[in-house]
Amino acid sequence: MPYLRGRKMRKRAAGCNEKGGKMDILEFLRHQDIPDSMIRDIQDYRKFYKVDDEVKDRVTVPEYNYYGRDVWEEAISALLAGENLLLSGPKATGKNVLAQGLAAAFGRPSWDISFYINVDAESLIGTDTLRDGQVQLRKGLVTLVAQYGGFGVLDEINMARNEALAVLHAVLDFRRLIDIPGYGRVKVNEAARFIGTMNYGYAGTRELNEALASRFMVLQMPVISEENLQRLIRDQYPDIRPEYADEFARLFTEIRSKCEGGEITGKALDLRGLLAALRMIRKGLPAGKALEMGIVNKCFDRYERQLVADITAVRIPAQLTADQVFTS
């Protein structure tokens, strides 16, 4: 019996249910100790706001779970209050993972709206197109979010041009509408929410203007703790041996500390790369080669690349194999 209880606890820590399958997102939130009152409010929201059949395929199951009770509580309370949310934080803090998890928790279709230099008002709202011999509106991503009451993830919003940002003002404030020249107004569905993400560390980013920032509740994303990183690794790989879940988490934490200390740049601080390296190890690639591709080679300066290679070699033996890392 003690063994069975321990196994159940390990599965729950890894984001799995007692049968070993991936937890439903609301079940996961319960195990994150999110208050029952919040979960009931989410369930009421789901019942009240139905999803149109044509966009049901956009209600996705998140690939990763975000670990962090306080962050979940703050984010959920903002969205339940009808607010939009801005997730701000450095690299590898899980901004997009949380955004995807929130859309799944609320059961809403989601659209990823990536901002880059060529994104303009037309790409967000829509543009004329010829269909069946007639000029019609080809709806942009923001318009689709507004129409279907979805969750729009405004990725790297502080890279957007002013022209694109101006479109969002009336969408995000009390007016909740889009004026489309020649087509009239589109009201933003009550269920719709916008979640912005931003990172000041990337090239091309800039300060977010006050008018836009005031339309969001801002959540400063904390650095993932080593304990929560271990949970994330076990979530993705429930059969990983505990000692190696610890070692890979410690490796990432050590790389982060080197970045914070100014010894290396943030190029090697790649959580996606670490998880991808574990996938490649499972497929038969030795750990050294997998980490080289997933983390070390993200540094293009030869001196820095050697430093990161030395850090990984100390933590993880280069010839480590899948049979040693995983139990099955």
Image (cartoon, grey):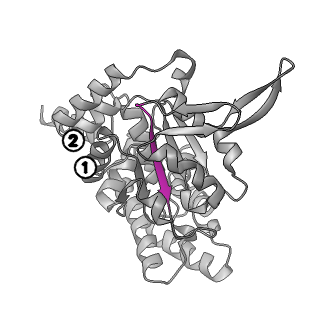
* Mark earlier in primary sequence (1, 2): 2
Quarter of the image with the N terminus in it: top left
Label tally: 2
- The quadrant where residue 238 appears: top left
Question: Residue at 62% across / 70% down in the picture?
Answer: 203
**Contact, CB < 8 Å: mark 1 with mark 2?**
yes
Identified by mark 1, the residue type is Arg
**How far separated are the C-alphas under marks 1 and 2?**
7 Å
Q: Is residue 87 above or below residue 132?
A: below
Residue 122 shows in the view: yes
Q: Secondary structure at mark 2?
A: loop
**Is 64 on the left-hand or right-hand side of 71?**
right
Q: Which residue is mark 1?
A: 69
Give the x, y percent position of residue 257.
Answer: 41, 75
Question: Residue at 48% across / 58% down in the picture?
Answer: 212
Q: Which residue is mark 2?
A: 34
Main SS category, magenta section: strand
Give the x, y percent position of residue 227.
Answer: 29, 57
Quarter of the image with the C terminus in it: top left
Give the x, y percent position of residue 161.
Answer: 65, 60
Choose between 141 and 133: the one closer to the eye. 133
Q: Secondary structure at mark 1?
A: helix
Give the x, y percent position of residue 233.
Answer: 40, 49
* Residue 196 colored in magenta in the image: yes
Q: What crowding class fits label 1: few (fewer than 14 Cα within 10 Å), some (14-19), or many (20 or more)? A: some
**Is 273 on the left-hand or right-hand side of 314?**
right
Residue 93 shows in the view: no
Q: Is residue 9 above or below residue 154?
A: above
Identified by mark 2, the residue type is Ile
Q: Which residues are magenta?
A: 190-198
**Is 277 on the left-hand or right-hand side of 80?**
right
Q: What crowding class fits label 2: few (fewer than 14 Cα within 10 Å), some (14-19), or many (20 or more)? A: some
